[in-house]
Image (tube, rainbow, N blue to C red):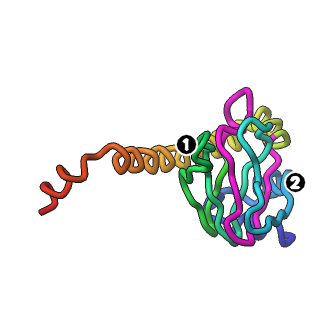
């Protein structure tokens, strides 16, 4: 097993996947590096990858006119980010920016989608894992909405 296959096999997102399937995925991957402040992807661009974060910190953001970027979520080492590749028309719905020097494994999803079309086991595995990622992101969004719209006076009364 080469170094990239080993890194992918050891990533929590791929736990339980066979060595043969890891090798299939490895054929669609590359190492990438982003400087602090560098955008990994931007809203509206083609979503043709997802990322396994090896080191660093990445924010998911949306741009608010007259206010600037609003951070939706922040992920760190061991995380997976980038789910827009799953749903046509395969374009990013948010921006992703490296907050510090960041290293990741970039998974080419044009390559992965072709493999998923012919390998239903791999397809089911990836869809079920990304369903968990989406559920986690919905929970983050829910908590942010509570923080934005909750009446601080009412919350203080409940917590006292």
| Front one among 51 and 72 | 72
- Taking depth in this image into account, of 111 and 75 the one nearest to the observer is 75
Task: Name which quarter of the figure residue 157 lies in.
Answer: bottom left
Measure the C-alpha gap from mark 1 to mark 2.
Answer: 23 Å
| Residue 98 in picture, x, y percent from top left | 71, 62
Left/right of residue 116 with respect to residue 27 in the rendered view: left
Provide the residue span drawn in magenta.
83-109
Q: Is residue 18 magenta?
A: no
Q: Is residue 106 magenta?
A: yes
Where is residue 152? Give x, y as percent: 24, 52
Could you say which disc has been placed on residue 143 in the image?
none
**Looking at the picture, how far across and down is residue 134, in whole percent?**
54, 44
The quarter of the picture where the N terminus appears is: bottom right
The quadrant of the rendering that contains the C terminus is: bottom left
Residue, disc 2: 27
Residue 16 pos. (x, y %): 62, 59
Residue at 74% across / 35% down in the picture? 44
In the picture of the structure, the residue carrying the numbered disc 1 is 131
Residue drawn at the location 65% of the way across and 53% of the way down: 81
Other residues around mark 1 within 10 Å, as few (<14) / some (14–19) / many (≥20): few
In the image, residue 126 sits, relative to residue 55, either above or below, namely above
């Amino acid at each position: 097993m080469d170094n990239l296959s080993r890194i992918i096999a050891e990533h929590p997102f791929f736990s339980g996947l066979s060595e043969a399937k890891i090798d299939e995925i490895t054929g669609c991957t590359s190492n990438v590096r982003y400087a602090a402040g560098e955008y990994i992807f931007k809203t509206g661009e083609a979503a043709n990858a997802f990322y396994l974060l090896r080191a660093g910190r990445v924010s998911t953001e949306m741009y608010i006119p007259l206010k600037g970027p609003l951070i939706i979520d922040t992920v760190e080492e061991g995380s997976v980010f980038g789910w827009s590749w799953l749903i046509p028309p395969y374009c990013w719905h948010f921006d992703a920016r490296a907050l510090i020097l960041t290293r990741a494994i970039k998974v080419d999803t044009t390559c992965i989608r072709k493999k998923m079309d012919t390998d239903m086991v791999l397809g089911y595995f990836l869809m079920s894992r990304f369903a968990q990622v989406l559920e986690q992101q919905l929970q983050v969004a829910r908590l942010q909405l509570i923080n934005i719209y909750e009446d601080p006076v009412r919350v203080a009364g409940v917590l006292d």
